[in-house]
Amino acid sequence: MTEFEVVNVVGTIDFQQPIALDPLADSLANREESNRVEYDPEELHLIHSWLFEQKVYVAFYKNGTCSVTGASSLSEFHEVSEAVSDVVQDILDFEVSPSIRVANIVTTSEIGYIPTLEAIAIGLGLEQTEYEPEQFPALIYRGEDAVFLIFADGKIVCTGLDDIDEISSAIDAITEQIEALEGL
């Protein structure tokens, strides 16, 4: 099993009703978990906020949904989701059970050696790969469910999946394919 590190969890929180952004922006600005809040109703109809040491970004939309990005683990994503729910509950007139959904987990891993990206691009199939080192330093492989960035130093970024077990299986599979193509 190839080890990997979660570097970004992206998801949504849906309160299933509109949110009044003016009082929410005021409430966010006065919360200790909030580090920065940007809200200009004349320019944009959303609130930009950074929570937990400016690491996690949450966009609040007046239709009642929030986009969350920047959590470095599933537990941190859920912690942020709970904090966001608490803030929104403070301004709503009734208790709402939000729908929370992880949409994408970005991970990094290493294969432990310097791969031959040109050979890997051909071996994985030119219709599923893009490799233009003059434009971008990684081979892009679009698998069935995930997208992989394979760098010349052996680092791999996996994106497009929302389940840790699926990510583990996908990383193991691509690592095995690369090793087979490299004759290891």
Image (cartoon, rainbow, N blue to C red):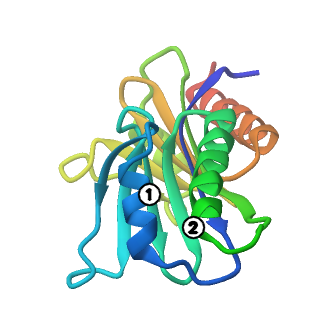
**119 w.r.t. 116: above or below:** below
Q: Residue at x 81, y 38 (%)?
A: 165
Q: Nearer the viewer, residue 82 or 145?
A: 82
**Location of residue 171 by image quarter:** top right
**41 w.r.t. 176: above or below:** below
**Location of residue 169 by image quarter:** top right
Determine the secondary structure under disc 2: helix
Q: Name the N-terminal-most of marks 1 and 2.
A: 1
Q: Are marks 1 and 2 in contact (CB under 8 Å)?
A: yes
Q: Residue at x 47, y 48 (%)?
A: 121
The residue that mark 2 highlights is 91
Identity of the amino acid at label 2? Ile
**93 w.r.t. 101: above or below:** below
Disc number at residue 27?
A: 1
Q: Residue at x 26, y 49 (%)?
A: 136
Specify whether 140 is left or right of 71: left
Residue 14 visible from this viewpoint = yes
**121 w.r.t. 157: above or below:** below
Identity of the amino acid at label 1? Ser
| Quadrant occupied by the N terminus | top right
Q: Nearer the viewer, residue 134 or 59?
A: 59
Crowd band around label 2 with a 10 angstrom C-alpha radius: few (<14), some (14–19), many (20+): some
User: Farthest front residue?
Assistant: 93
Figure disc tally: 2
The spot of residue 111 in percent (x, y) is: 55, 21
| Quadrant occupied by the C terminus | top right
Q: Residue at x 65, y 39 (%)?
A: 79
Q: Nearer the viewer, residue 121 or 103?
A: 103
The spot of residue 34 in percent (x, y) is: 40, 43
Specify whether 114 is left or right of 162: left
Residue 130 visible from this viewpoint = no
The spot of residue 58 in percent (x, y) is: 46, 56
